[in-house]
Amino acid sequence: MALKRRLIPSTMNWRLLLVLGLYLMLAVAYSIVTPIGRGADEWAHYWYAQFIAQNGRLPTSPAEREIAGYKSDWPPLYHLAAAALTFWVETDGPPNFKYRADNIRRQLVPAQGPEAILHTDDERFPWQQEILIWHLGRFLSITFSLGTLIVTYFVALAWFEGVGVGSNGLTGKGVKKYLPNLQSPI
């Protein structure tokens, strides 16, 4: 109990909760507003997690890794968690992603990555099928990043234990040391 009180000062609890709440609101809003496929490497992570969800295992051969995407040689913690979170979602039938390559009019200019999907009203709430899987994966990423923020907070508390933070402590002294002296010579 004493260790818990020492690591979590009561004045810091509200700051941590404020930062976590603000981050959660912004991350969820950004996740919902950003069109499917616009995030960095979202495609590769999606295909890797879907391979695990559909086959119940990691890819074992070069041919399976080709199917699972270029992220399939990465550590699989996130992808295993995403597969466990989304294995129950049916992907047969509409709504599915509308690929530019499926439309003869859109094949004139090949589209890669985020431009490969035609964004339609199927992406709006309530999400279903592949769109639901995509958003659940994004929410899992937000959960992992919240965990990272919490761990970082407690590591910083333990690291800077006993060091004052504020105008008289570490932060204030650091800022004061590197600010130019603004006193007038007169």
Image: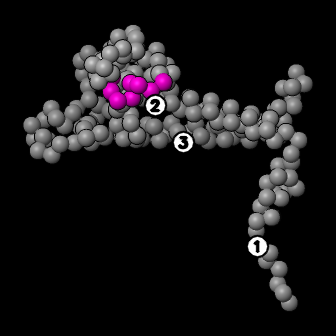
Marks 2 and 3, the one that precedes in the sequence: 3
Q: Is residue 78 visible?
A: yes
Residue at image x 26%, y 36%? 117
In this rendering, the label closer to the viewer, 1 or 3: 1
- On the image, numbered disc 3 is attached to which residue? 26
Extreme-front residue of the structure:
62
- Residues in magenta? 68-75
Query: Given the image, on which type of amino acid does mark 1 rest?
Result: Pro
Q: Position of residue 176 (x, y in %)?
A: 81, 64
In this rendering, the label closer to the viewer, 2 or 1: 1
- On the image, numbered disc 2 is attached to which residue? 138
Marks 2 and 1, the one that precedes in the sequence: 2
From the viewer's side, name the closer residue of 131 and 64.
64
Q: Is residue 134 visible?
A: no
Q: CA distance from mark 1 to mark 3?
A: 35 Å
Q: Tell me whether circle 2 and circle 3 mark residues in contact (CB < 8 Å).
A: no
Q: Is residue 186 left or right of residue 118?
A: right
Which disc number belongs to residue 93?
none
- How packed mark 3 is, by other alpha carbons closer than 10 Å (few <14, some 14-19, many 20 or more), is few
Extreme-top residue of the structure:
56
Q: CA distance from mark 2 to mark 3?
A: 13 Å
Q: Quadrant of residue 148?
A: top right
- In the rendered image, residue 73 lying in the magenta stretch gets the answer yes
Q: Position of residue 173 (x, y in %)?
A: 83, 59
Q: Is residue 48 left or right of residue 93?
A: right
Q: Position of residue 143 (x, y in %)?
A: 56, 28
